[in-house]
Image (cartoon, helix red, strand yellow):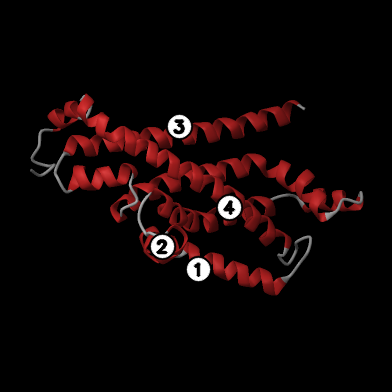
Amino acid sequence: MSLLSTPFWEVFKASFSPGVWKAIWPAVLDTLYMTLIASVITLIFGLLLGIVMTLTSKDGLHPVRCFNAGMGWLINCLRSLPQMIMIILMIPVSRMVFGRSYGINACIIALSASCIPMYARIVQSSLLEIAKGKIEAAKSMGSSNTQTIVRVLLPETLPSLIRGFTVAVVAIISMTALAGSFGAGGIGDIAVRFGFQRFQHEVLFACVYVLVIMVQIIQFTGDFASKLILRKRHLI
């Protein structure tokens, strides 16, 4: 039966039935697992790439123009790929690493590969906003490049980095739902197999609830942490 031909109120009430949520909870845990691991990988490698891109830029602490241009070109190429295409391209890599191209672990590679370039650009943009006077003051006091990064660049841009990471995590959650249609498991798999292919609309609605709640929690946490750091900085 089509979703448009089903009374909305009946589907809405059915989406809260215990039977629906009993089938969804394992998928929720799978989605949380994929999001957590992919977010950690994105944070580490995206932060490193963003710092390297900033350091090696024309006005950076250690300019290497050829390397910076090559890295920028590669990151732009990866960012230009839609999420669905990235999932397809990462299938051989997942098969090589995990021995299979489906499942929650295999999906993590595609999630990370898609979101690392995005977060790297966010990190780079945040670091480039720092006033050059602060960097020059740190260098004049004898700080090394590493000390300048740790003591000036990262602390000054921490609220912006947190907000950018929040955006990246939300993108990861969105991509896990898409990856479900490629055998990744999680909420996306339940929504496609049961909510769409088997016309169990109450399951589809329940999956939407879960995704909305997850995004709201992530967004609230990121905004709260960013504002808390700014508030403490103003009180010092």
Which residue is depicted at the point 52% across and 42% down? 166
Identify the element where label 3 is drawn. helix
Whichever of labels 4 and 3 marks the residue nearer the N terminus, that label is 4
Please tell me in which quadrant of the rendered image residue 8 appears. Answer: top left
Q: Which residue is mark 4?
A: 122
Q: Residues within 10 Å of mark 3 (few under 14, many from 20)?
A: few
Q: Earlier in the sequence, mark 4 or mark 2?
A: 2
Q: Amino acid at mark 3?
A: Ile
Instruction: Report, in whole angstroms, how far the alpha carbon at label 3 lies from the one at label 1.
Output: 31 Å
Circle on res. 95: 2
The residue beneath circle 1 is: 77
Disc 3 and disc 1 in contact, CB within 8 angstroms:
no
Q: Which residue is mark 3?
A: 217
Q: CA distance from mark 4 to mark 3?
A: 21 Å
Instruction: Say few, some or many: other residues with alpha carbon within 10 Å of mark 4 (under 14 / 14 to 19 / 20 or more).
Output: many
Q: Distance of mark 1 from mark 4, alpha carbons?
A: 16 Å
Asked whether the residues under the numbered discs 1 and 4 touch, taking CB atoms below 8 Å apart as contact, a structural biologist would say no
Residue 236 position (above or below residue 31): above
Q: What's the residue at 49%, 62% (across, down)? A: 79
The kind of residue on which mark 2 rests is Arg
Kind of residue sitting beneath label 1: Cys
In the shown orientation, is residue 179 left or right of residue 138? Answer: left
Query: Distance from label 2 to label 1 (Cα)?
Result: 23 Å
Q: Circle 1 sits in a helix, a strand or a loop, which is it? A: helix
